[in-house]
C-alpha cells in the first residue's frame, strides 16, 4: 500500500463518535447532518423510480433532466450556468475527490484555508500534493481571514487553492469583495480555485439578494480556473443519498465524465430522480430548513455564551457552533470525556486543524430545540464538576 495512504490520519470525529455509538443516553451533535429525515416528496420520487425499474446505468455526467434542473437552479442564484459546465456526482465528497484527481499531480503545491473539514486537505495529500495551510484567526470567538497572508502564500508555484465558505467548522464566510480579490490574485498566479460551497444556502445574513452566501460564481467568468462543489446533503436533508454536482469550465466537463466513469460510472438513477424532485420543490424545502437552522443557532449560541469559560460567536452560515473551552486544550480528550462523563457528543476541533485544538464543534441541526438546551445543561454541569475536582 502507498505510504501516503498509510500515513493518513483517521477521522478524529469518528474516533470520538465511536466511543459513544450505541449509547442511548448520549446526546449526539458530532456529525454534520440534521436529525430530520428527507422530505417525503423526495423519497417518493426515488421509490417511484425504483418501481418503474430504473435500476440501470445512466450517463456519466448525470441524467439530462437533473443536469438541466441543476442548471436552472444555479442560474437563478448566480446568473447563467449552462449544462455544459455541470457534472452530477455521487455526493459532495466524490465531487471534491474528482476535482483533486483532475487537477493535482504528485508534488504539486496546494494551499488550503483552515480550519476545515479534514476530507478537503486529506484528498490533496492522497494525490501526493505538498500541502500548505493558511489559518483563519479567532477574534472574540469569530474566525477571520488574513487576506495578506493568504495572498502571500499563493504564488505561481501554487497549483490549487482549497477554500470552504461558509466554513465547516467555524461558520466563517467570505464576502463577495474578498472572493473577487482572491480570484484576481489566483488569475495572476495561474492557480486553480476549488471552492466547497455546499453550505451556501445555509446562510443567516440579509446582505445578499438571492438568499444565499456569496459565491465565487458571482464574480467569475465561465473559463476561469474555478471548480465549485455542491451537494444535496445539507440544504435538502439528503446526507445519506450521496448526490452532488460540480460546476467547472466548459472545456473541463467531458474530461470529468471520463474520471466519473473510472470512479463510480454514474450516480444511481433513482437517487438522481430524488434530486430532480428536491430541486422542483426547493421553494418549499430549503427556506424552511434555513429558518429552522437559524432558530437552532439563535437558541444554542446565547446559551453557550452564558457558560463560564466558553468563547463562541454566532456563525454567519452553516450548521455549527464552534467554541473554545478555557482550560481544556486537548479537544480530543475533552470530547471523549464529555461522551463518557456527561453523555454529550461533540466533534473535536483538532479534527479540522492543529490550530483548533481546544475548540469543539457542535452541530445544531436538531429538530428539538429543547435538546440543544439539555446539551448545554450537561456541558455546564460537567465543567462545574471538572473544576471542583481540579480536572
Image: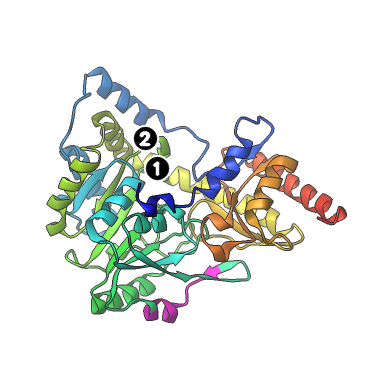
Q: Residue at x 68, y 42 (%)?
A: 339
Image mark for residue 241: 2
For residue 159, above or below residue 71: below
* Label located before the other in sequence (2 or 1): 1
63 relative position to 302: left or right: left
Q: Residue at x 44, y 52 (%)?
A: 8
Q: Position of residue 228 (x, y in %)?
A: 29, 57
Image mark for residue 233: 1
194 relative position to 31: left or right: left
Q: Residue at x 38, y 77 (%)?
A: 153
Q: Quadrant of residue 20?
A: top right
How would you rate the neighbour count of disc 2 (Cα within 10 Å): few for under 14, some for 14-19, many for 20 or more?
many
The quarter of the image holding the C terminus is bottom right
Q: CA distance from mark 2 to mark 1?
A: 7 Å
Chain part drawn in magenta: 143-152
Q: Quadrant of residue 64?
A: top left
Q: Residue furthest right?
A: 388
Amino acid at each position: 500500500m502507498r505510504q501516503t495512504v498509510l500515513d493518513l490520519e483517521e477521522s478524529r470525529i469518528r474516533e470520538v463518535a465511536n466511543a459513544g455509538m450505541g449509547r442511548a443516553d448520549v446526546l449526539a451533535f458530532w456529525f454534520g447532518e440534521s436529525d430530520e429525515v428527507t422530505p417525503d416528496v423526495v423519497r417518493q420520487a426515488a421509490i417511484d423510480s425504483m418501481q418503474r425499474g430504473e435500476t440501470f446505468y445512466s450517463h456519466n455526467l448525470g441524467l439530462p433532466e437533473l443536469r438541466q434542473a441543476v442548471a436552472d437552479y444555479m442560474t437563478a442564484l448566480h446568473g447563467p450556468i449552462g449544462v455544459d459546465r455541470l457534472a452530477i456526482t455521487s455526493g459532495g465528497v466524490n465531487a471534491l475527490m474528482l476535482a483533486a484527481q483532475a487537477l493535482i499531480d504528485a508534488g504539486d503545491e496546494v494551499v488550503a484555508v483552515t480550519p476545515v473539514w479534514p476530507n478537503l486537505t486529506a484528498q490533496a495529500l492522497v494525490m501526493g500534493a505538498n500541502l500548505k495551510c493558511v489559518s483563519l484567526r479567532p477574534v472574540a470567538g469569530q474566525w477571520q481571514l488574513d487576506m495578506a497572508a493568504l495572498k502571500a502564500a499563493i504564488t505561481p508555484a501554487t497549483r490549487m487553492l482549497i477554500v470552504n465558505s461558509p466554513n465547516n467548522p467555524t461558520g466563517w464566510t467570505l464576502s463577495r469583495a474578498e472572493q473577487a480579490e482572491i480570484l484576481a490574485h489566483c488569475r495572476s498566479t495561474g492557480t486553480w480555485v476549488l471552492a466547497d460551497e455546499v453550505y451556501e444556502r445555509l446562510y443567516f445574513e440579509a446582505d445578499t439578494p438571492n438568499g444565499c452566501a456569496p459565491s465565487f460564481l458571482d464574480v467569475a467568468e465561465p473559463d476561469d480556473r474555478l471548480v465549485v462543489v455542491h451537494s444535496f446533503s445539507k440544504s435538502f436533508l439528503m446526507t445519506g443519498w450521496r448526490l452532488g454536482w460540480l460546476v467547472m469550465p466548459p472545456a473541463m466537463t467531458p474530461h470529468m465524465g471520463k474520471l466519473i466513469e473510472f470512479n463510480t460510472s454514474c450516480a444511481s438513477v433513482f437517487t438522481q430522480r430524488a434530486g430532480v424532485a428536491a430541486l422542483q420543490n426547493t421553494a418549499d424545502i430549503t427556506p424552511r430548513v434555513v429558518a429552522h437552522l437559524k432558530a437552532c443557532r439563535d437558541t444554542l449560541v446565547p446559551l453557550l455564551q452564558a457558560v463560564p469559560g466558553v468563547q463562541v460567536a454566532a456563525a454567519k452560515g452553516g450548521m455549527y457552533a464552534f467554541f473554545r473551552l478555557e482550560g481544556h486544550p486537548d479537544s480530543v480528550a475533552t470530547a471523549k470525556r464529555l461522551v463518557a462523563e456527561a453523555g454529550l457528543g461533540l466533534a473535536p476541533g483538532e479534527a479540522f486543524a492543529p490550530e483548533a485544538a481546544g475548540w469543539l464543534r457542535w452541530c445544531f441541526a436538531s429538530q428539538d430545540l429543547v435538546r440543544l438546551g439539555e446539551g448545554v445543561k450537561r456541558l455546564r454541569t460537567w465543567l462545574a464538576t471538572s473544576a471542583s475536582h481540579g480536572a
